[in-house]
Image: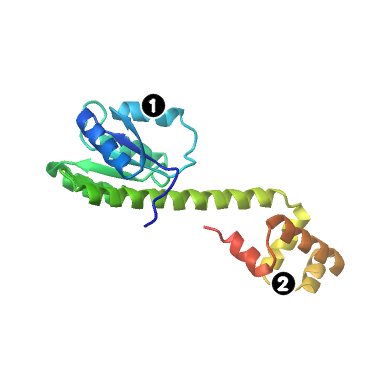
Amino acid sequence: MEPVTDATVYIVDDDADVREALAWLLRSRRLLSECYPSAEAFELMLQTQSAVRRPCCLLLDMRMTGMSGLSLFNLMLERGQTDAMPVIFLTGHADVPTAVDTVKRGAFDFCEKPFSDNALVDRIEQALAKSGEFLQAKQAREAVRCRLKELTEREQDVMRLVVEGVPNKLIADQLDISVRTVEVHRARVFDKMQVKSAVELANLLRTP
């Protein structure tokens, strides 16, 4: 797998030695990281940060003094933040059943301590790739919405019928306009939506 560029791995663990070891491991694999000593500190960062724009993931210790990793995960899950920022739990043996449950609820994975460096980095890279894919899809949806806003009401009417496969003559009849006017609106729709065919337009509107 090609490494994801311009990505950040967030590390949240109340053990300074663990944070430093993980940060060193990631540096050795050319991955950027940011460390936080508590779930509260990371939560404060999330509250002040704008929407996620770059691929990232979170290495989260399940048991910490103060707010637990599980409580932080639940907050992120409620806010819909775990798609853009996949969560990998770092757990002890006693936490494994709970960690398995979190995966079922949306965590990306869990790694049991002591973990294999190579296995952990592999999962981190996969989580970053997933984050990148989610952000690309989100940007594509936003781009489509912006293009749709540029259409006039009449162009939207024509577009809907074009996507349904209705011929220009029937579109003209339904909208009580001339075929030439339909052709003009159709051309403007294709131009504004940046497509070259009705099939391409239909596929664009089905962007997940």
Q: Judge by depth and name the residue closer to the eye, 105 or 63.
A: 63
Q: Which mark is residue 198?
A: none
Which residue bears the numbered disc 1? Answer: 44
Seen in the picture, residue 7 relative to 65 is either above or below; the reply is below
Q: Is residue 101 visible?
A: no
Distance between the alpha carbons at the discs numbered 2 and 1: 53 Å
- Horizontal relation, residue 135 to residue 186: left or right: left
Q: Residue at coordinates 27% horizontally, 29% vertically from top-left?
A: 67
Figure disc tally: 2
Callout 2 amino acid: Val
Q: Provide residue 116's location: percent of width, then percent of height.
A: 19, 48
Examine the image and state in which quarter residue 91 appears: top left
Query: Does label 2 or label 1 sit earlier along the sequence?
Result: 1
Quadrant (top left, top right, bottom left, bottom right) of the N terminus: bottom left
Disc 2 secondary structure class: loop
The structure residue drawn at horizontal position 30% and vertical position 42%, both measured from the top left corner, is 28
Indicate whether 64 appears above or below 157.
above
Q: Are marks 2 and 1 in contact (CB under 8 Å)?
A: no
Identify which residue, 13 or 182, lies in the foreground: 13
Whether residue 21 appears in this view of the structure is: yes
**Residue 15, image x and y in percent?**
21, 29
Image-based side of 114 in relation to 118, left or right: left
Q: What's the residue type where badge 1 is placed?
A: Leu
Q: Secondary structure at mark 1?
A: helix
Which residue is drawn at the image coordinates 55% and 59% (left, top)?
Answer: 207
Viewer-nearest of discs 2 and 1? 1
Crowd tier of the residue under label 2, counting other residues whose Cα lies within 10 Å: few below 14, some 14–19, many 20 or above? some
How would you rate the neighbour count of disc 1 (Cα within 10 Å): few for under 14, some for 14-19, many for 20 or more? few
Q: Position of residue 81 (x, y in %)?
A: 41, 41
Badge 2 is on which residue? 166
Question: How far across and how far down the image is residue 33, in percent?
Answer: 35, 36
Residue in view at x 22 percent, y 41 percent? 90
